[in-house]
Image: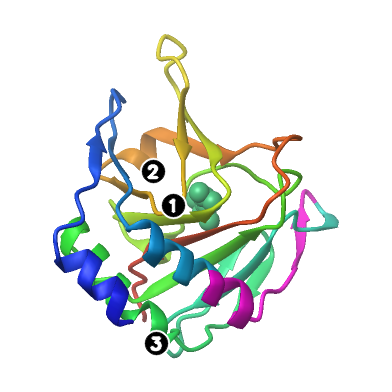
Amino acid sequence: MHDAQLALFGGNQPSQAQPALPDADVRHLVGFLSRSDADALLRHALDTIDWRQDTLRVFGKEHMQPRLTQWFGPPGGTYRYSGIEMRPVEWPSWLEATRQGIEATAGVRFNSMLGNLYRNGQDTVGWHADDEPELGHQPVIASLSLGAGRDFRLKHRTRDDVAPVTLHLGHGDLLVMAGNTQHAWLHTVPRRARVSKPRVNFTFRRLVVP
Ligand SMILES: O=C(O)CCC(=O)C(=O)O
Ligand SMILES: [Mn+2]
């Protein structure tokens, strides 16, 4: 996408916050994408992605996942979590320039991406870490937010003297989690009754394909 390329490499100036999180490496780039590029990507994501709602199996019980997802990955890069097996679909060409810009910022190459669609504030993802073995030891995860702003909460797994942290992820923001973040911390996007608009989130990952 030409517009995104211009903004990514043409000096869009995000402001960067480094929240104080012990045992973690988290960077929040507010306004990583320009408003118009973020608008265009959100429109493409809502109009063209074949969003699906999976059934989760947690502690032997089945329930519908409270968000829609799609898994974009390398051929053979099936992704498994909570009893779901996601076969990869082809990477959308309209995200290519954005992926390259995100790789330049994160300092790694990504070969897969989980797309999340939160239809409104009732959709959510519970406390978890992105620590599946396929992601390797200290995964770098870059997460791009589009659409409605949502809170993103982090809590330390073992230290109750460390307070949980809430970031507000807005339209066009990038969050990069690296180092020990997934080992030491959990994260969630909690329900928010007042949010009525959709939010799309793309988490870029590097999957080790056997
Ligand atoms: O929507 C978000 O910001 C986070 C999504 C997430 O944690 C995940 O898909 O693993
Ligand atoms: Mn996650």
User: Is tag 2's residue or tag 1's residue first in the polypeptide sequence?
Assistant: 1
Q: Are marks 2 and 1 in contact (CB under 8 Å)?
A: yes
Residue 188 in the image: above or below residue 19: below
Which corner quadrant holds the N terminus?
bottom left
User: Is tag 3's residue or tag 2's residue first in the polypeptide sequence?
Assistant: 3
At horizontal 34% and vertical 73% (from top left) the residue drawn is 208
In the rendered structure, which amino acid carries the disc numbered 2? Gln
Residue 192 horizontal/vertical position (percent): 70, 35
* Label 3 vs label 2, nearer the camera: 3
Among the 4 quarters of the image, the one containing residue 147: bottom right
Report the residue marked by disc 3: 93
Instruction: Please tell me how crowded label 1 is: few (under 14), some (14-19), or many (20+) other residues with Cα within 10 Å.
Output: some
Residue 40 horizontal/vertical position (percent): 46, 71
Reply yes or no: does residue 109 show up in magenta: no
Is any part of residue 161 visible from this angle? Answer: yes
User: Is tag 1's residue or tag 3's residue first in the polypeptide sequence?
Assistant: 3
Any mark on residue 131, and which? 1
Any mark on residue 182, and which? 2
Q: Are marks 1 and 3 in contact (CB under 8 Å)?
A: no
Magenta segment boundaries in residue numbering = 43-59
Q: Is mark 3 within 8 Å of ligand 1?
A: no
Q: Nearer the viewer, residue 113 or 136?
A: 113
In space, the residues marked 1 and 3 are separated at their CA atoms by: 28 Å
Among the 4 quarters of the image, the one containing residue 112: bottom left
Q: Nearer the viewer, residue 143 or 57?
A: 143
